[in-house]
Amino acid sequence: MGNQLNWRALAGALAAITVTTIFGPATAGSADYAFELVETEVKQGDSATVAVRLFDKRTGGPVADAIIFATRLDMAPDGMEAMTTSVEAMPSDQPGLYRFKTNLMMPGGWQFSVAAKVQGEPDTIESKLVFKAVP
Ligand SMILES: [Cu+2]
C-alpha cells in the first residue's frame, strides 16, 4: 500500500516537471543567463580548482550572489559517467565568479553540471560545462 502511494506521488511529481518544462522557456528568463568556464584546461590533482563565471547574456555583466545548489562532476565526456568526484564551493573574490575545489584524479574530459538560482529569477539556471584535466 505504501508503495502504491509513493508511485502516485511520483506520477504527480513527474506531471509537475512536464508542466514546468512546457511552460518554462515561454515565461522566463533562465535562458538570459549562462555559465562559462574560466579555463577549459585545468591542472589535474587532488586540490584542483574549477572556476566558472555566471553572466547575464542581455548585458554581458556578471551575476553575483547566485545560489549554487547542485553540482556534479564526472567523466562523461570520456565515457566514464560513473566516475564522479567531490565538488566543494569556495569563497569568491570577484562578483559573478564561482570557484570550486575538486579532486581531478584522472586526466581527460570532465563534465561539470551546475545549477543555480539568481535573485528575481524564478527559473533555475542549469549548465553542463566540459573541460579537460591535464597532467
Ligand atoms: Cu576516468
Image: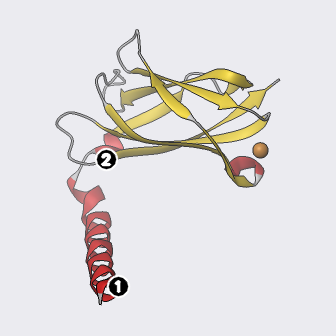
If the image is split into quadrants, where does the C terminus sit? Answer: top right
Judged from this view, the residue extending furthest toward the front is 1
User: CB atoms at circles 2 and 1 under 8 Å apart?
Assistant: no
Residue bearing the label numbered 1? 3
Residue bearing the label numbered 2? 124
Specify whether 118 is left or right of 94.
Answer: left
**Quarter of the figure with residue 107:** top right
Vertical arrangement, residue 76 with respect to residue 132, above or below: below
Front position among marks 2 and 1: 1
The numbered dot on residue 64 is none
Which amino acid lies under the numbered mark 1 shown in the image of this protein? Asn
The residue lying at 68 percent from left, 40 percent from top is: 110
Q: How many marks?
A: 2
**Quarter of the figure with residue 47:** top right
10 Å neighbourhood of mark 1: few (<14), some, or many (≥20)? Answer: few
Judged from this view, the residue extending furthest toward the right is 135
The residue lying at 76 percent from left, 54 percent from top is: 79
Question: Helix, strand or loop at disc 2?
Answer: loop
Residue 20 picture location, percent across and down: 27, 64
- Relative to the observer, which residue lies in front, 56 or 120? 120
